[in-house]
Amino acid sequence: MGPTRPASLIVAGLAAAAVAWLLISSFYGDIPALPWLPPVTLAALAVLEGYAALTTRARIERRPGRDPVEPLTVARYAVLAKASSMAGAIFAGFYAGVTVWLVIERTRAATDDLPAAVGGLVASLALVAAALWLERACRVPERPDEDEQPDADRDR
């Protein structure tokens, strides 16, 4: 399993934005107001993954006062981070498409839905950032090469 590619996240976000634009432009009058629960949930996930990244990195580096981390836990966090970054990119694209459409639309309902759409976009981007941070925190730290000798010893 390799690191998440930014291009994959961008393509997923752009595809979700296009779908959101098509859906909202077709069905906006028939759907209820945008709810606040998804942005709050995305923000909570971002906070939890950010905290997991902070503690996991400290445990991997075996900082004083931290218990060592089990390798299976780190693998699970890495899978969670990859899935969360993709889900966050899809949500960010969706909310970006909705936000742009609502900015262009000049109705009272669109103005009322705009704060929830912007909140969803911000929370989604925070989830992507936290997930990428968690993925980076799960990497095995590079160790200095103990086999190499100082330059002075090589000249002998």
Image (cartoon, rainbow, N blue to C red):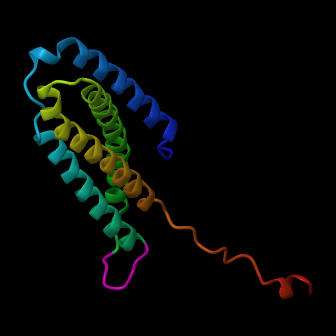
The vertical placement of 32 against 4, above or below, is: above
Query: Would you place residue 133 above or below residue 90 in this image?
Result: below
Image coordinates of residue 46 in percent, x first then y, are 26, 53
Q: Is residue 62 above or below residue 87?
A: below
Is residue 18 in the magenta section?
no
Q: Position of residue 126 (x, y in %)?
A: 31, 51
Q: Residue at x 10, y 20 (%)?
A: 31
The foreground one among 9 and 34 is 34
Which quadrant, please, contains the C terminus?
bottom right
Q: Which span of residues is magenta-colored?
A: 61-67
Q: Residue at x 17, y 14 (%)?
A: 27
Residue 2 or residue 148, whichever sits in front: 2
Viewed as shown, does residue 79 lie left or right of 117?
right
**136 left or right, relative to 32:** right
Whether residue 66 is in magenta: the answer is: yes
Residue 103, position as x, y percentages in the image = 27, 30
Quarter of the view holding residue 59: bottom left
Give the residue at x 29% y 30%: 94
In the rendered structure, the answer to whether residue 107 lies left or right of residue 88 reads: left
